[in-house]
Every structure is written in structure tokens, then in C-alpha cells.
């Protein structure tokens, strides 16, 4: 049973525009969330995190929003750059240790 | 600071053989996690080691096992290999348990079963 879902396998965005990647979860005990970026032949790279006491966390061009009542989080990238083209994974944990990952969304930023 | 390192990069085995994958965590990190990423799937949690002890395991058969050494490096062993074990195996480390710390990943070992 997939407790973390990324329902969009792929997303294409023009350079300079906003990219919005979505993630839904089912377990109300999840209270710590991460986003990772993965290039081919490399391991996932940590991007940004958010804990359940917040509804927004910002780091440069990356902002993560958390809607606990909807069990939904999203990653906004503004402005999108061609180097952002990668697979993005969201992950959630009830304890900060064992994480449940989504299946990923492949982002293509078109120059 | 060196990142998480995994070896080998690629490993080719045949059905029934045994595979050993290795991971060195970031210096100062005591927790090591193993994940399997099969084709088209997300990362599936395999095992978590901390301070030399297995803390939790995912929904995988007992032929998946491992250990953590005193220097916090870790091995993942897969016995009686099956075709469906073909996947990317990722190791991650984090600084401490019971706190919200991101996990940092290595580049993985690609295991192919022929």
C-alpha cells in the first residue's frame, strides 16, 4: 500500500516559469516531510524539508507547502531553470527515521 | 566533507547467488538506511541500522540482511538471488535518531540478476 503518492509521473515547464510538484499521503501520523531531486546515475539529493508544525518552508527558489488537513504537500520552484530537470521525490516519516517515498515526478524545464 | 559512498557501482549476479553491497556513511552520521528502487517504483525501505543495531526493517524476506560495523559502515547481503532483486540499492545516512534529520544518499549499487 503506497502511503505517499505522486500522481503526476511527469511535468514540463518553460524556463523562468513556476514548477509545482505535488505529493499526497495517507498516514496522519506523518509529521516530517522531505523533497529530493535525483539525476540519472546519481543518488537522491536532499532539497528541502518541512515539519508538521509549519505550513511553509522556503529556501531560495524552492518553497514547500504543507496542508495537513488535506494530507498534501507541494514543492514550488520559481523561477524554473533547465538544470532543475530531474526526478523529484517526496518522502514522509512519522518518526524522522523511517521514510516512505513517493514514486517520483520527472520534471523537464524547457529552455 | 565526503558524502555517502557505496560500492560496487554495478554488480552482476546469477539466480541463486549471494550479493554483498557496502556503504560508508558521512563522517559523524551514526544511522544507515538501505532502500531498494526497482524499475518504475519509488524507493522502498529495506533496513535501518543505528549504533550497530538493526532498528527496523521493511517488508522484505529474511534473505535480505545486513549489519553495521563499529565505524558505522554497513553491508547489505542478499542471499538466494532472484530475478526480481534486480534494482538500484541506495544507502543513506543521517546524523542521529529520534530527531528530524534529512537522510543523505549515496549514488547506489545497480544489482543485475541474470
Image (cartoon, rainbow, N blue to C red):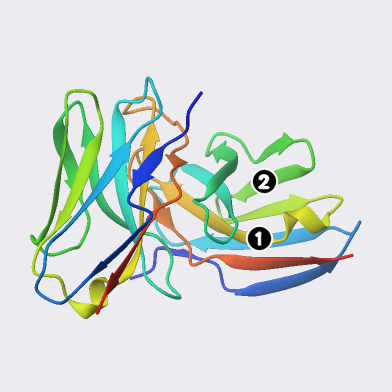
Name the residue rendered at 53%, 55% in the picture. Answer: A90
Identify the mark nearer the N-term, 1 or 2: 2
Label 1: chain letter: A
Q: Compare residues A93 and A42 and report the one nearer the observer.
A: A42
Q: Quadrant of the C terminus of chain A?
A: bottom right
Please count the marks in the image.
2
Q: Quadrant of residue A19?
A: bottom right
The local secondary structure at tag 2 comes to: strand
Q: Are marks 1 and 2 on the same chain?
A: yes
Residue A96 seen from this side: no
Q: Quadrant of residue B69?
A: top left
Name the residue rendered at 70%, 65% in the picture. Answer: A107
Dot 2, how many residues are within 10 Å of its Cα: few (below 14), some (14-19), or many (20+)?
Answer: many
The local secondary structure at tag 1 comes to: strand
CA gap between label 1 and label 2 equals: 17 Å
Q: Which mark is residue B104?
A: none
Q: Is residue A2 above or below residue A65?
A: below
Name the residue rendered at 84%, 50% in the picture. Answer: A78
Q: Compare residues A100 and A41 and report the one nearer the observer.
A: A41
Q: Position of residue A83 (x, y in %)?
A: 77, 54
The residue tagged 2 is A64
The residue tagged 1 is A86
Q: Position of residue A94 (x, y in %)?
A: 37, 44
Q: Position of residue A73 (x, y in %)?
A: 60, 54
On screen, residue B7 versus residue B4, left or right, reads left
Q: Residue furthest top?
A: B28
Residue A12 seen from this side: yes
Name the residue rendered at 44%, 31% in the picture. Answer: B100
On screen, residue B81 versus residue A45, left or right, reads left
Label 2: chain letter: A
Amino acid at each position: 500500500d503506497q502511503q505517499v503518492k505522486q500522481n503526476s509521473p511527469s511535468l514540463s515547464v518553460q524556463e523562468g516559469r513556476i514548477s509545482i510538484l505535488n505529493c499526497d499521503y495517507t498516514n496522519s501520523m506523518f509529521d516530517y516531510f522531505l523533497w529530493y531531486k535525483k539525476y540519472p546515475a546519481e543518488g537522491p539529493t536532499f532539497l528541502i524539508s518541512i515539519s508538521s508544525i509549519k505550513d511553509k518552508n522556503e529556501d531560495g527558489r524552492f518553497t514547500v507547502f504543507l496542508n495537513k488537513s488535506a494530507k498534501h504537500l507541494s514543492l514550488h520552484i520559481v523561477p524554473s531553470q533547465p538544470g532543475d530537470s530531474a526526478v523529484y521525490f517526496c518522502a514522509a516519516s512519522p518518526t524522522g527515521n523511517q521514510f516512505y517515498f513517493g514514486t517520483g515526478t520527472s520534471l523537464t524545464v524547457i529552455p | 566533507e565526503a558524502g555517502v559512498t557505496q560500492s560496487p557501482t554495478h554488480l552482476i549476479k546469477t539466480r541463486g547467488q549471494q550479493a554483498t553491497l557496502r556503504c560508508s556513511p558521512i563522517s559523524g552520521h551514526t544511522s544507515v538506511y538501505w532502500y531498494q528502487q526497482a524499475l518504475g517504483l519509488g524507493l522502498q525501505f529495506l533496513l535501518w541500522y543505528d549504533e550497530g543495531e538493526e532498528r527496523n526493517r521493511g517488508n522484505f524476506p529474511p534473505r535480505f540482511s545486513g549489519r553495521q560495523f563499529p565505524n558505522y559502515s554497513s553491508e547489505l547481503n542478499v542471499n538466494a538471488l532472484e530475478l526480481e532483486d534486480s534494482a538500484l540499492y541506495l544507502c543513506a545516512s543521517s546524523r542521529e535518531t529520534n530527531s528530524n534529520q534529512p537522510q543523505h544518499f549515496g549514488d547506489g549499487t545497480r544489482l543485475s540478476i541474470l
